């Protein structure tokens, strides 16, 4: 201990914190051992004090020099000085301040000496750990509050639809503005709802399992249908995340409205299904490829002689001649970077078996599943090409032949007729000069009304990239009507494309066919219609009965039949003659036919017997119809002396009936009416 004052302060050496005795002039007159250890290395003030001073009164080392290293008082630098507080306020006995020394925090407390009002003591207590703990807690609290605020701001401004639910109950505790806008509920309404109010199609148990899976794994995902406040249903992706806040488990739900996406996906699937149906059944080859094949339809697999798996390992140009590889590769490279790029060529390909085919290839670049691919069609034109080559190789023979056949033949381009044989002017009723002065449009000016068959389509006026077309049309030149079979194909002529048309007069064939159709219609009419009454005959009735009975039984619909004949018709024939009897039969048929519906079938069953087949007619309605027919006949004037009446039998379908059962029952009904006195309706 170093003592520099008249008093003995050695007791302070036992304290573990620095103690300083200071007079009213801020001179330090005592340092305990701890103070010496803490401040001795700060500056040279204490050393000089120790070496140069002999008495306490002559000490000149200042407290602010020892503890702070300052040359002027702390308060003049704007810092709080506890010693100055005591000097200025004599009623005050204690003043304190926190002081930072080499990164350590000391609490400096100044207090008066009880025996000397101008002597003061300072204790410097190291409170660094305590302050650090307080600061950590305070900072953690501030960061927590800041984090909560940030979380709240983030949640409210999240660009997605989001709400928070209790993990266990599914009760919604909060929802952001996007959720309010999407679902149409207010925040207050949301806080009185559960997840099942939005998703009523899933049970509470399954919804809870969905949340518990997120609790277990941290997150979960599913696609649901959610119902909005206005009742509208929307397809949504639900991504949920488990979180714990203030000791309680919550689920944050992020909703992505995929309704429009799902509609588009459904439409895309429908389009893909349509494409697949067409591709699987179209007779031309179809493929999707990049550099290698991605897909090929059955027609192309058959054309190339490969399986789908074999084709996927091949480049799309491998089937062509090697001399064209670079051209095809260049086209594919350009096509894979240019939507809508088109490429076509006619060339030979070599099948897996080694067989050669001529094909017409057309490829276009499209977007498929997010990337550019090529869709190509392969048309086998081997037959057409062979025909074209044959025509070219045998041109001289062709000329000889076409000048000596009856069919008109023309070779043409889009501007003019290049050649026609001598039969063509005669067939069309035009002179050679008229044909030469005209254009292909003149001879190909055919509209749909001229077509002999409506199942074919017209081709363009001049040749196009199609290889052939064929139909028969009606040609009228100054009232001279002919039917012409026109076949048109594309050929190569003098190194360029041209059209070849063959006109054949098939008038006799068409007329003969038309006469056969007329005869067929007449025969059909004779086989189905009763020649006297001009209503259906027994044969037609038998066929119709089977048809209507089967329909009624299949669909469990009512069906009734009515059989009637003319009472005492033999007496009428005997007394009035058969001509009168025939006239009565014809008159009767016309009379009854007027009373029937379009759906009823009316036939002469034989002699004076008739049959009405009435579909969709229960027994009550059939009896009413039969009675109405009976009265109509009874009241009609048949131009003979005695009154003409009919007796009728009615039967309705029992679903165990066959044709024979139904006919037997209606016949019994007619027999019953006859036995009861005639001019009656009978039913069994």
Image (cartoon, rainbow, N blue to C red):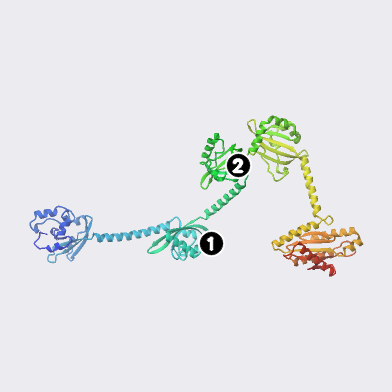
* Quarter of the image where the N terminus is located: bottom left
Disc 1 target residue: 231
Tell me if mark 1 has few (under 14), some (14-19) or many (20+) residues whose alpha carbon lies within 10 angstroms of its own.
few
Left or right placement of residue 453 versus residue 84 in this view: right
The percent coordinates of residue 282 (x first, y second) are 62, 46
How far separated are the C-alphas under marks 1 and 2? 55 Å
Q: Residue furthest right?
A: 575
Q: Is residue 408 left or right of residue 643?
A: left
Reading the image, the residue beneath label 2 is 303
* Disc 2, SS: helix
Q: Is residue 650 above or below residue 534?
A: below
Q: Would residue 233 be seen by someone viewing this image from the given angle?
A: yes
Tell me if residue 418 comes above or below residue 368 in the rendering: above
Q: Residue furthest front?
A: 353
Along the horizontal axis of the image, is 149 left or right of 480?
A: left
Residue reaching furthest top?
A: 396
**Element type where label 1 sits in the image:** loop
- Of the two numbered discs 1 and 2 on the same chain, state the one appearing first in sequence: 1
Q: Nearer the viewer, mark 1 or mark 2?
A: 2
């Amino acid at each position: 201990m170093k003592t520099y004052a008249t008093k003995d302060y050695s007791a302070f050496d036992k304290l573990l914190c620095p103690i300083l005795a200071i007079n009213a002039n801020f001179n330090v007159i005592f340092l305990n051992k701890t103070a010496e250890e803490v401040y001795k290395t700060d500056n040279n003030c204490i050393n000089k004090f120790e070496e140069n001073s002999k008495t306490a009164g002559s000490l000149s080392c200042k407290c602010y020099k020892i503890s702070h290293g300052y040359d002027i008082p702390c308060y003049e630098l704007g810092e709080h000085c506890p010693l100055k507080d005591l000097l200025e306020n004599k009623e005050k006995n204690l003043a304190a301040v926190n002081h930072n020394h080499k990164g350590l925090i000391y609490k400096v407390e100044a207090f008066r000496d009880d025996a000397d009002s101008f002597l003061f003591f300072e204790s410097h207590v190291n409170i660094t750990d305590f302050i650090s703990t307080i600061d950590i807690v305070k900072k953690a609290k501030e960061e927590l509050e800041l984090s909560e605020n940030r979380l709240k701001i983030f949640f409210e401004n999240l660009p997605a639809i989001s709400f928070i639910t209790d993990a266990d109950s599914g009760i919604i505790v909060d929802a952001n503005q996007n959720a309010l806008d999407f679902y149409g509920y207010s925040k207050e309404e949301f806080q009185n709802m559960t997840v099942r109010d939005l998703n009523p199609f899933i049970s509470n148990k399954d919804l809870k399992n969905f949340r518990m899976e997120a609790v277990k794994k941290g997150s979960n995902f599913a696609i649901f249908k959610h119902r909005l406040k206005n009742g509208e249903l929307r397809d949504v992706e639900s991504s949920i995340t488990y979180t714990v806040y203030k000791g309680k488990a919550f689920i944050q739900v992020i909703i992505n409205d995929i309704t429009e996406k799902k509609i588009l996906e459904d439409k895309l699937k429908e389009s893909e299904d349509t494409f697949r149906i067409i591709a699987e059944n179209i007779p031309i080859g179809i493929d999707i490829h990049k550099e290698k094949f991605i897909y090929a339809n059955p027609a192309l697999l058959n054309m190339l002689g490969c399986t789908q798996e074999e084709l996927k390992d091949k480049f799309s140009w491998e089937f062509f001649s090697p001399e064209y590889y670079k051209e095809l590769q260049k086209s594919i490279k350009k096509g894979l970077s240019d939507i809508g790029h088109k490429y076509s060529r006619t060339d030979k390909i070599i099948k897996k078996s080694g067989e050669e085919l001529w094909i017409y290839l057309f490829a276009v670049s499209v977007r498929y599943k997010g990337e550019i691919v090529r869709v190509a069609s392969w048309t086998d034109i081997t037959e057409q090409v062979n025909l074209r080559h044959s025509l070219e190789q045998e041109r001289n023979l062709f000329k000889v032949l076409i000048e000596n056949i009856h069919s008109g033949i023309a070779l043409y381009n889009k501007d003019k007729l290049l050649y026609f044989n001598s039969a063509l002017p005669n067939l069309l009723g035009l002179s050679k000069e008229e044909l030469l002065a005209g254009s292909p449009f003149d001879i190909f000016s055919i509209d749909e009304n001229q077509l002999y068959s409506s199942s074919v389509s017209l081709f363009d006026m001049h040749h196009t990239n199609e290889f052939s077309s064929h139909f028969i049309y009606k040609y009228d030149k100054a009232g001279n009507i002919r039917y012409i079979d026109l076949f048109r194909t594309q050929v190569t002529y003098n190194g360029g494309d041209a059209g070849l048309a063959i006109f054949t007069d098939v008038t006799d064939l068409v007329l003969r066919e038309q006469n056969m159709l007329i005869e067929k219609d007449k025969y059909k009419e004779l086989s189905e219609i009763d020649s006297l009454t001009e209503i259906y005959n027994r044969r037609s009735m038998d066929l119709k009965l089977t048809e209507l009975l089967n329909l009624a039984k299949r669909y469990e619909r009512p069906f009734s039949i009515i059989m009637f004949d003319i009472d005492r018709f033999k007496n009428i024939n005997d007394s009035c003659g058969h001509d009168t009897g025939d006239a009565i039969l014809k008159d009767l048929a016309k009379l009854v036919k007027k009373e029937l519906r379009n759906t009823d079938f009316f036939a002469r069953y034989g002699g004076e017997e008739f049959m009405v087949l009435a579909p969709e007619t229960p027994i009550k309605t059939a009896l009413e119809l039969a009675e109405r027919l009976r009265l109509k006949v009874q009241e009609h004037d048949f131009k003979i002396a005695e009154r003409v009446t009919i007796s009728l039998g009615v039967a309705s379908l029992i679903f165990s009936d066959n044709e024979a059962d139904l006919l037997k029952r209606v016949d019994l009904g007619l027999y019953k009416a006859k036995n009861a006195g005639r001019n009656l309706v009978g039913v069994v």
